[in-house]
Amino acid sequence: MIYDTFRKTIAKYKLIEAGDKVLVAYSGGADSTTLLDLLLRLRQELGFEIVVAHFNHKLRPSSDDDEQSTIQAAQKYELPLFVGCKNVRSYAKRHRLNLEEAGRKLRYDFLKKTAAKIGATKIATGHTMTDQAETLLMRLMRGSGPQGLSGIAPLSEGILIRPLIEIERQNIEAYITAQGLDFCIDETNFDRRFLRNRIRLDLLPYLQKNFEAKIVLHLSRLASIFQEEEKYLEKISEDAAQQAIFVRNGQSFLDRKYLSTLPDALARRCVRAFISRLKGDLKSISFTAVESILNLGERKELTLKKNLLLRREKGLIFLKEETSPKIGYEYSWKGKRPLILRVLGMKFRAIRLKKKGPLPLEFDDKRRAVLDAAKLKFPLLVRSRKQGDRYRPLGAPGQKKLKEIMRAKGISVSERERLPVFLSKGKIVWVLGLPVSEWFKVSEKTKAIFVIEKL
């Protein structure tokens, strides 16, 4: 029964096709163990590759035991295995995230980088229909709109797939018992300090017992309805946003007069599209913030989170450049000793490596630049940004103004002054927090790598 549902879900949403290379996010728990077992069965029918990936969060004493169980499972089924590990607690503290957010961010970064490295066409996760119901309840409590209530999509970003999304957890548990499959138990799933766990352990069972036995199914159906309607509304919103948002001299403007002609629901979506363009995402942007932008008076200003200062003039809303004290500095660096930028309170080091096979370091624009050593001329010049600075970011079709790149990335004016610029013979090599220059990238012809790393 469960296998039939699994196959129908995959067929309905075209999650896996013959010839795919599927990277399975495997924690060792009941859901991912069931997912792997079902994929192994389906592989015999459909014909595709399976690779296992495990991310060790290092958050509990049994984390290493789970990793060993993953290794044993990969060996048992003769599957390639990739293991990642990061200090989630430290990352959460450094980036002011809760542990769940930090773990999710690092886990998906690892999965996507691994998929890119091995050429995987799909990343399969073990999200179930019950996870969907829990997610909807969490977002209802937080006041999410239709987009948030769309929940977990069966297919997202063209590569992330959730083949178990139409199967309840109780059916997963019954299957794993019937098949006699070994799995790990994550004790943090019983920690009621986390909202999701309280919903899973207390709220959902209470609703099922006292209100509606099929609440999980109904919430899942609700998510599916929102997903379909969201696709339609997103198309309409894109068309409206093209009319409402325009760029002049590298700066984005929101036409408040045009917004006044739209239904409120569509106007809100245009505002969200505008903020996303300025900030890079919509994290921490609430319904109240969107309403405040819509109601911003002429010649009035509004400060959002992340130091976004918006102003309305002549019916146009735009990002106002905050005046901040300039920090001027200039250093010559040969890369042999650590570079200390006392004015910023920053320290950098250089690492020289020989390139043998795949890149030995992960890309991380916020703290590391990986460069072709032969293309660099020493000493490097390290200075504060200057008016008119231009360069070609990795993968970009041509040069752009540094100011425009920072604005597109949602970097506030005050932050921009604290991002050192590294140059080689007058050409920008890297700016902390941005991609390295296309001219100095590592390629197949690279023999030696020069790494700049923020300590």
Image (spheres, helix red, strand yellow):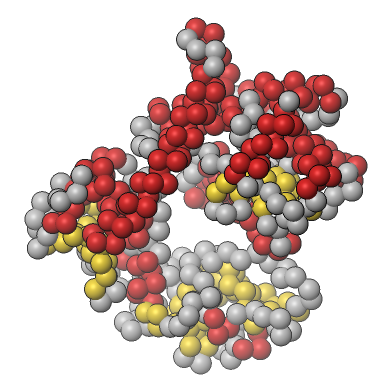
Q: Is residue 371 above or below residue 130?
A: below
Instruction: Identify the image quadrant of residue 315.
Output: bottom left
- Residue occupying image coordinates x 58% and y 72%: 369
Whether residue 436 sits left or right of residue 373 in the image: it is left
Tell me: 353 left or right of 376. Answer: right
Q: Of all residues shown, which one is farthest toward the top?
A: 210
**Picture residue at 53% right of the left edge, 39% below the top:** 152
Quarter occupied by the C terminus = bottom right
Location of residue 317 in the rendering, given as x and y in whole percent from the top left corner: 19, 59
**Relative image position of residue 136 (x, y in whole percent):** 47, 30
Q: Quadrant of the N terminus?
A: top right
Q: Answer above or below: position of 403 versus 114.
A: below
Would residue 335 be seen by someone viewing this image from the given angle? yes
Q: Position of residue 36 (x, y in %)?
A: 77, 39
Q: Nearer the viewer, residue 17 or 404?
A: 17
- Residue nearest the viewer, comparing 95 with 142: 142
Residue 88 in view (yes/no)? no
Where, by quadrant of the figure, is residue 109 drawn? bottom right
Task: Tell me the residue at 48%/80% (across/down).
Answer: 397
Q: Position of residue 156 (x, y in %)?
A: 55, 49
Q: Nearer the viewer, residue 292 or 384?
A: 292
For residue 215, side relative to residue 57 (left or right): left
Q: Quadrant of the rendered structure where residue 7 is?
A: top right
Query: Which residue appears at 58% of the width and 91% of the height?
Result: 377
Nearer to me, 355 or 72: 72
